[in-house]
Image: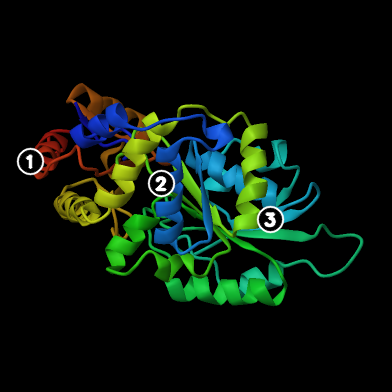
């Protein structure tokens, strides 16, 4: 099978497996796991934040951020198709007791004017704006990179109203690679940031939540409340350290592969590439073939290709380091037989 469902399907590299085997471990709840401590220190420095916390997943990192920033009854501002709103099972309501105020963005990017207009004034009828959440890259916008200039404008507005900004940066290293810029050119316009180690970076598990030291100390308690206080966790932190220090530079290869796939699909009758391919995600519309996304995915699977639905007639492909150029050209060849 050629698996293009997500960059979460990658298998750990040999170096990651060796790192897990050799990891120096200890009880992380007691802060005695030296591998976790090294990962957190490395991540904090790389992201330009004072402190960092190793968490089990990007969703857990985002939810801990909301829980730590907000109080029950607060409102958070976020883009209408953001991961926190769209794909996290209503957790901000179920866990933090906050409500969402969504803003329709353009390719995942909220207009600063709209964000400022959504911040609540002092009125007993209104919830307090507790947090503004950004996402970069933006998954449902087809891996779009949110420009740092847009982040800066929103961050300055948030600061004016004393509202913190959290960045769901699950694929933030893809954004940095796409723009050939440093990761801190994005993170400096955030109070807190979550980055995923198990997507394009290829680690088998884990994410990082980073921010000011007092915030991370409070976040650590929320992690414990959510059952995320682990023991000899260096075994899974070690592959994350490899991911963070050795896998970021190769992300541009995934972007090149995604553009190669998109270029070939542009020429295919009945298929339309609907996103501007900046990173490692390609979204196509198959309604020109007279098929639904589900029907098309079933036909792909019969030919040994895995993808996911992204709407009634939309299909998403994600490139990653386990997929070669030859795999993609073979995928295109097989897709040409579907009509």
Tell me if 128 is positioned left or right of 227 in this view: right
Residue that appears at 21% across and 35% down: 13
Give coordinates of residue 24: x percent, y percent.
37, 32
Instruction: Establish if 118 lies above or below 41.
Output: below
Reading the image, the residue beneath label 1 is 326
Reading the image, the residue beneath label 3 is 76
Instruction: Establish if 148 lies above or below 45.
Output: below
- Please tell me whether mark 2 or mark 1 is closer to you in this view: 2
Mark yes or no: residue 292 visible: no
Visual colour scheme = rainbow
Tell me if 26 is positioned left or right of 178 in this view: right
- At mark 1, the secondary structure is helix
Q: Quadrant of the C terminus?
A: top left
Cα–Cα span, label 1 and label 3: 44 Å
Cα–Cα span, label 2 and label 1: 37 Å
- At mark 2, the secondary structure is helix
Q: Are marks 2 and 1 in contact (CB under 8 Å)?
A: no
Tell me if 109 is positioned left or right of 277 in this view: right
Mark 1 / mark 3, whichever is N-terminal = 3
């Amino acid at each position: 099978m050629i698996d293009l469902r997500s960059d979460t399907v990658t298998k750990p590299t040999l170096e990651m497996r060796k790192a897990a085997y050799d990891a120096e471990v200890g009880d992380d709840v007691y802060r005695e796991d030296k591998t976790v401590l090294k990962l957190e220190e490395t991540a904090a420095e790389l992201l330009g934040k004072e402190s960092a916390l190793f968490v089990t997943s990007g969703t857990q990192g985002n939810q801990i951020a909301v829980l730590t920033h907000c109080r029950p009854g607060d409102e958070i501002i976020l883009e209408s198709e953001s991961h926190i709103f769209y794909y996290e099972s209503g957790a901000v309501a179920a866990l933090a007791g906050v409500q969402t105020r969504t803003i329709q963005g353009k390719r995942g990017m909220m207009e600063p004017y709209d964000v400022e207009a959504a911040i609540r004034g002092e009125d007993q009828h209104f919830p307090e704006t507790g947090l503004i959440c950004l996402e970069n890259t933006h998954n449902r916008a087809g891996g779009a990179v949110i420009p740092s200039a847009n982040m800066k404008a929103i961050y300055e507005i948030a600061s004016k109203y004393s509202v913190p900004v959290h960045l769901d940066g699950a694929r933030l290293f893809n954004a940095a690679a796409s723009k050939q810029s440093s990761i801190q050119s994005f993170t400096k316009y955030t109070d807190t940031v979550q980055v995923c180690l198990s997507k394009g970076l290829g680690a088998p598990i884990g994410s990082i939540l980073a921010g000011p030291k007092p915030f991370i100390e409070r976040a650590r308690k929320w992690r414990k409340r959510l059952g995320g206080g682990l023991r000899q966790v260096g075994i899974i932190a070690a592959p994350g350290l490899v991911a963070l220090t050795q896998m970021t530079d190769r992300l541009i290869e995934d972007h090149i592969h995604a553009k190669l796939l998109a270029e070939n699909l542009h020429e295919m009758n009945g298929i339309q590439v609907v996103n501007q391919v900046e990173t490692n995600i390609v979204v196509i519309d198959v309604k020109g073939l007279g098929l639904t996304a589900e029907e098309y995915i079933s036909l792909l699977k019969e030919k040994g290709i895995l993808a996911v639905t992204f709407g009634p007639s939309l299909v998403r492909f994600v490139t990653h380091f386990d997929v070669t150029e030859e795999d993609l050209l073979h995928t295109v060849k097989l897709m040409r037989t579907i009509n």
